[in-house]
Image: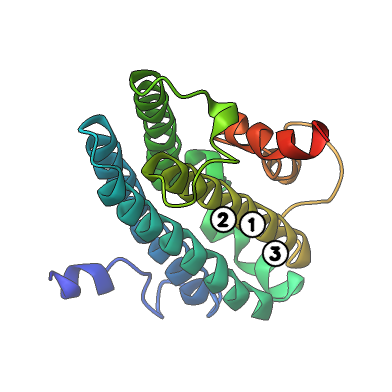
Amino acid sequence: MRTDTLLGLQRTPDEVIHRDELLFQVVHQSTELWLKLAAAELAEATTQVAAGQLPAAEALLARATLAVRLITDQLEMLRYLSPVDFQAMQPALGNGSGAESPGWRQVQGASRQLGRAFGEQLAAHGVEVADLCPADPSDPLHRLAEAMVEWDERVSVWRVRHYQVALRIGGHPPAGDPGSPANMLAKLAGHRFFPELWQARLRPTTDE
């Protein structure tokens, strides 16, 4: 399991400038591990979609979604960082942002690939995206579409919570440069990997 190597990745008590560096590092390093798993599950789900194995893809996507739920929950640990403590240790943390996260970049790419594979399956079955929402709930295409919407929603919840925590601990000012990390997080909160699936869900309402 290489646990010794894993546990050696954090600064030692003699190296830290503030004792809460360990808290911050554990949250972020474990986030990267869960994102790595989520990206791997998404990649395998894409392979299964391309092979027409939609139930298998749905199960894999559920696992990826749970991974993101877990990293959202663990953000609660950062609520115990005060702005004063965060500012004290910030010099040791650098100026990294979520955009620089290797796990997040992998998740973004894997999500786009999943969307393309799903679109190809719809075309192969002669199904329009708009037909998915009123479809038979037991239909594999419908079930996978629902799982993809759940994935999108869970990622959005994570982004919103991340943004709120960043403001709470004073990591980023709530206003300022449009390109600041805080403003980028706020803009991404409404981003969807599969906007056409969300639009399809609105159709039954807008057509009434």
Q: Residue at x 52, y 23 (%)?
A: 128
Q: Residue at x 53, y 80 (%)?
A: 19
Mark pair 3, 2: CA separation: 16 Å
> Are the two marked residues, 3 and 2, in contact with CB atoms closer than 8 angstroms?
no
Measured from the top left, where is residue 50 in percent x and y?
A: 25, 30
Marks 3 and 2, the one that precedes in the sequence: 2
> Looking at the image, which is closer to me, 179 or 59?
59
Tag shown at residue 157: 1
> Looking at the image, which is closer to me, 76 or 12?
76
Tag shown at residue 154: 2
Measured from the top left, where is residue 202 in percent x and y?
A: 73, 37
Q: Is residue 36 left or right of residue 158?
A: left
Report which quarter residue 168 is drawn in: bottom right
Which colour style is shown?
A: rainbow
Report which quarter residue 203 is drawn in: top right
Measured from the top left, where is residue 106 in percent x and y?
A: 37, 39
Residue type, numbered disc 1: Val
> Are the two marked residues, 1 and 2, in contact with CB atoms closer than 8 angstroms?
yes
Tag shown at residue 66: none
Callout 3 secondary element: helix
Mark pair 3, 1: CA separation: 12 Å
Q: Is residue 152 above or below residue 66?
A: above
Q: Residue at x 13, y 69 (%)?
A: 2
Residue type, numbered disc 3: Val
Tag shown at residue 165: 3
Measured from the top left, where is residue 139 in percent x and y?
A: 41, 45
Mark 2 neighbour density, 10 Å: few (under 14) some (14–19) many (20 or more): some
Callout 2 secondary element: helix
Residue type, numbered disc 2: Arg
Taking the view exactly as shown, the residue that stands out farthest to the right is: 175
